[in-house]
Amino acid sequence: MKQILSLLSIIVFSFAQGQKNTEAPTCFQMKQHAHKSIKSIPDTRVDSIDILHTKLNIDITNWSGRTLIAIAEIDFEAKQNITSIALDLLKLQVDSVKQGFNLLSYNYNDTLLSIDLAGTLAQGQQTSITVYYRGTPVQNAGDWGGFYWNNTYAYNIGVSFLEDPHNYGRAWFPCFDNFEERCTFETIVTTSDTRKAFCGGLLQSETDNLDGTVTWHWFLNQEIPSYLASIAVADYATVYMTFNGVQSTPIPIELAARATDTTALKGSFVNLIDALHCYEAHYAPYAFDRVGYCVTSFTSGAMEHATNIAYMRNAINGGTGQETLMAHELSHSWWGNLVTCSTAGDMWLNEGWASYSEALFTEFVYGTEAYKEYSRKNHDNVLRLTHINDGAYYPVSGLPTDLTYSSTVYDKGADMVHTLRGILGDVVFDDCIHDFLNDFAFKDISTEILSSYFSYCSGKDLGSFFDSWILEKGFHHYSITNMDILADGIVWSAEGTIRQKLWENNTYTTFLPIEISFFDADFNRFDTNVNTYGACSSFKVSVPFEPVYYALDMEEHIQDATVDKYEILDQLGTRDFDLARVIFDVQEITDSVLLHVTHHYIKPDPFQTAVPGLHLSPNRYWSIGGVWNANFRANAIFRYNGSSSQNLGNLDNNFITIPEDSLVLLYKAKPSDDWQMVDSFTLNTEGSVLNKAGYFEVYDVKPGDYVLAIYNKLQVDDPASFEDCIYTGLYNFDRLDKLVKVYPVPAENYFRVDVLDENKENLILKVSSILGAEVYNQRIKTAEASQLVSVKDWAKGPYIISLIAEGKLVYSTKIIVE
């Protein structure tokens, strides 16, 4: 599903649960106020009962009264001996319940229908109960889901934002309303003969009852959770299409809209077939019997009901401006409908992947650059706005239930999927997705399952990525802190370090591959991946030419706390680098140049020598570089904005607290330098020194880092804490670190090294200071499994632990001695 209105506009309120039957398990608890950590009571009914099939017979001819008359026949099997069953049903009138010819006793409190069976149902036995009910289905004012009924349309939206659990099948039929229980569905709907009913699955029959009514019989062969069942009734016309995918038989497509809307519908859905081809190519074969959309009067997005997506009329106008909504909902046929999150806390597995699928569809139809632009815009919004929209920084998995459908889940979730793709590479990523969706088809899944499966499938240990990116709030930031380029025979050697910083996060990622791009003076390019481990990682790579420029993750495969943009410039004039937040005015150019800008959403390195009263921006800076020649000259505009407007993300609001004429712009040529004043610039406050908006124009911009700073003597100076990330020549090889355990960290009197790989023999354990002075050298035997090293006489500080096998460094790590 995708909501159009901001979640901030929804009022979160509490509601009281009715008196519950003490013999029946409950599947929801009282809703609490926003941003409280809420966990629903586990729905234990799935441990004792398996619902096999739900058959709904609904009379919806009382249009003016907005009431339906319905019969629900529920087939189920006992997983253990049972004497009762409890079904969720919300505020409808129950007339009677039967098991065969037996009239059953029951208790109903407008929330839970607790039914006593005719006798004990033994484990493995199957039976069926029939519930006769009627009434006006729920659609609470201010809620997103429920049952909408007006003069033209009647339809359900299967998710509530305000109820807990959010599943909303219970708004119109009795069910186990959770993400785990799945069954096939049969829906028989009687309407007036001027209207059509669309439900999940394939239409089995259309019967004219010769009394002014028609009965529509639909059957969904695939098992789904209750919230994905659907009904939509209106004076629909049908647009018929066919999808010829990888399946042996064509898949029917039925798009339902009023006759006056079908032309616009066709225009807005012109790329539907491409979307299906995209998701089959990258995910798995389409697994349902039909593709279906129903246009409704809904104005707040769309809902991914299986094979019968409820789609808002406002999104069809004959153009493709909102086609990513179409693509988002279709992608749920893989992420959400085929595999479903086990709990609300794992909703990113539904919605984050569907939001990523919007970008994937954009790439398939419009190309790589369109994909990058789409993902870049989303990523910038995540860095600037998500914590504002949601009230705090959160991980994408394990959110409180009032944030189940939040920007963190949708937008940051898409960011995390994009990053997982970048870590694995396209081929491995697609292969793992395909296998995963096949192995877990029509099952519920968790973040832990996804992490373990993709680690196994890819051969990469993704545990640290999931722990520190998915299950941890905030962001990570990577940058090259130094690089030495050395001639090495007919090739060149590049050796340097990559620093990892944390932004509103507490856990360093201990393994993450990231791409470095090298360029020569003729724009020849060489890309290579290096592995990063922890806060400071060394690398050494061979380059087939002499590099004149290098950059980290130029293609934005890893959605860390940066936004990048690069272009080839070949003419005079202004070029806006948009989300990288620099505008260039090219003054002189005689040949093409490569210009690359990175906008860093992270605290810059501090002064090495503090300047009293001068304070750096606490949350951002820029890096500018590229392949330039001596005849290239450009000015650069760096904007600042301290507006408190939410849409602007408060970039500099907390930083600019005094008049803007106290602002300056600082520069350094390389990360190891100290900050200094830019040589030549002007400050334009745009008419006022109090509006917190303006820009610096730097004349004859140079490659390097730039940062805003402000003179404010009333503010306490930041402590000088610059720590260089220096090259040590130590790398992790072959992931042996997963077979070595070093503890405790930090070490006080001793540390221990356990080698868990019995195939490694006669390892040499070396320990050196951070400056390279060797303080320990000892051969260890893996048969002994452990080596104890005393540090009582060592100076406090960091040390490098290395394992050498046959003269080759096979493992290294850092340890702190306190």
Image (cartoon, helix red, strand yellow):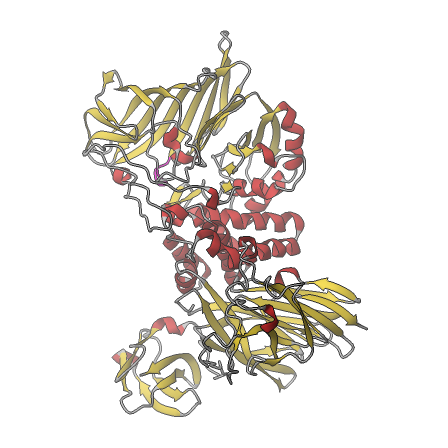
Over which residues does the magenta segment extend?
178-182
Foreground pick, 140 / 123? 140
Residue 670 sits above or below residue 506 on the image: below
**Image quadrant occupied by the C terminus:** bottom left
Percent x, y for residue 795?
Answer: 33, 90
Q: Residue at x 49, y 35 (%)?
A: 288
Residue 510 makes an appearance in the image: yes
Residue 261 sits above or below residue 729 on the image: above
Percent x, y for residue 446?
Answer: 37, 50
Percent x, y for residue 51?
Answer: 32, 32
Type of secondary structure dominating the magenta stretch:
loop
Q: Residue at x 43, y 90 (%)?
A: 772
Give residue 547's quadrant in the image.
Answer: bottom right
Percent x, y for residue 438?
Answer: 45, 46
Q: Residue at x 52, y 81 (%)?
A: 607
Q: Is residue 6 left or right of residue 638?
A: left
Residue 183 sits above or below residue 516 on the image: above
Q: Is residue 248 left or right of residue 746?
A: right
